[in-house]
Image: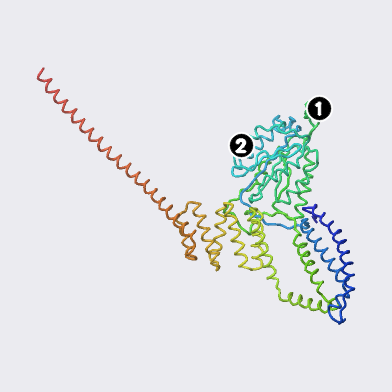
Amino acid sequence: MNFSCQRPYALYGLALLVPALIISIFQFKKAYRNLKFFTVKDKSSVLARRMKNFALIFGVRTFCISVAWAMLVLAFAGFSWGTYLAPVQTSGTAVSLVFDISYSMNADDASSGLSRLEASKKYAKMLLSHIPDTQISVVLAKGDGVTVLPLTDDRAAVESLIDSLSSNFMSSVGTSLGKGIKSAQKSFPSNFSFKNSIWVFTDGEETDSLLENSLISCVNQGISVSLIGFGTERETKVLAGDGKTYVLTALRSEKMKSACAAAMKKNSASKVSDVQISYIDATEPGSALTLLDGVKNTSSSDYSSDSEENGVSYEIKPVQRYSLFLGLGILFSVLSYVISELDPEGIAEKFKKTAALIVFCMLFVSCKAENSVFGAKNILEGSWFWYQKKYNDAVAKYLQTVFDAQEDENPLLEQYAVYNLATTYLVQNENDVALERYRQLENVEDKNVRYAVFYNCGIIANRKGNYEEAAKFFRNALKIDGTKIDAKINLELSLMNAEKEAKSKENVQNQVSESKTSSTMEESIFARIREYDEKQWKNSEKSENSNSSQDY
């Protein structure tokens, strides 16, 4: 069980209980002395019984307030234990290239007589040529991990950076593959749902033993990692960073294999099947194909909420327990005020009534209603993530709600979850996926949802340049609610753009026909000119012949 505390410094707030309890003791003594001056004639009244049991009431009330404060502090501290699998719908692929540029990579024992670093650069450029649609980031690992190129699709910049890699890029001492992998994790943005992979080009030499922990962290985040080995198992001398000392270095394949095995053991325990942690020797036949097979290009048309291969992956996330502590804090806070008003001698009778009420409520609360409450909670949390622009977390919450609603046969909850999911995709400019989700909601009964569906479908069609289709969607939206000004404006704009597009096509056709007509007229004119020239030439020839006969 993974037990963690997000803000351990918050536990210092528990120290405030000590002075609070001391002050409460002095207040109790002062109040107890003042009670001696008050007398109650009716000794059987509730007030008399409360004054008689004042010490008990005060002690229990102080205890409840103290526990409530402790629970609030623990809730703020952010305790979590246990994990759960969060579904994340991916769109596209992203790969972070981690280059080990330590001095051991300068050893000339790679294939074709190249150094390990030069061989890794050549190998990486070969891989890049086969994944043109994948987002790429570049991280350098030496004594630390540094992201030198954030996630981008500019291949020229990536290849230029790879060509210029050198061990002199960083002045850090030692080798830390773990820090390089952690920097690669941070290079993937949290508000985009890519299928993430990390390729590490290294010889396995490290000085801080952080590799295994970083691989396990990647498993928890649903990121696949491939360690690509360069060099030979035979130790080779290489010049250290001081420029004087020679050290022995070799390919540490066994060490990397054991780290990958430990991470995959964690993966099998968590049942995250689509995450792969593996070691690959760069000299093995088919090693590049193995790497490329791990990077699956997902298109927008392949989305399916029921298929893991079509873009749905899972991340291991800790179960936050702040709601538990917060609920206990509120409960004890309420109890502190209730207890001060209770009749101590009548607590047993009231307890029986309260227990009966609880049993009554439990009998009439069904499991389906409970699941609906949890589904609404997931939608609320997803909306909170959405407004924070954490779209990846919002998609996970909405997908979980869709799955739960389908299992519980709750169509209303499923409709709202699908609508929020489609709107999130629309914000991420994933128009095809959003349109597919919206089309599932065209026949819902809620007029507000139907209007929003047609309106957003019109926005998507307008983005694609399908102005006639966009106008159709906006008309359908206005049929549901004709008072919406935005839909009217967008309808007029779509009609204007459609008319402009039609006119531009008509002008192109007219220009083509005019060019054909002008070419035909030119040909007829040139034919007439040729005929006139031939007649002139024949007439001149006849006159010359007649003159020559007379001269003769």
Among all residues in the image, which is located at the extreme front?
Answer: 37
Q: Report how far apart the C-alphas of labels 2 and 1 lie in the structure.
A: 35 Å
Label 2 neighbour load within 10 Å: few <14, some 14-19, many 20+: few
Is residue 473 in view from this perspective? no
Query: Is 453 displayed left or right of 550 in the figure?
Result: right
Q: What kind of residue is marked 2?
A: Ala
In the picture, measured across the screen, residue 82 lies left or right of residue 25, that is: left
Q: Residue at left 82%, top 75%? A: 342
**Label of residue 31 in the image:** none
270 over 133 or under it: above or below: below
Q: Amino acid at mark 1?
A: Thr
Q: Earlier in the sequence, mark 2 or mark 1?
A: 2
| Placement of the N terminus among the 4 image quadrants | bottom right
Q: Pointer 1: what residue?
A: 245
| Residue 181 picture quarter | top right
Quadrant showing the C terminus = top left
Q: Position of residue 253 (x, y in %)?
A: 77, 40
Q: Is residue 315 above or below residue 253?
A: below
Q: Secondary structure at mark 1?
A: loop
User: In the image shown, does 182 or 228 lie closer to the viewer?
Assistant: 182
Task: Determine which residue is flagged by label 2.
Answer: 157
In front of the other: 426 or 159: 426
Residue drawn at x 71%, y 57% as measured from the top left: 85
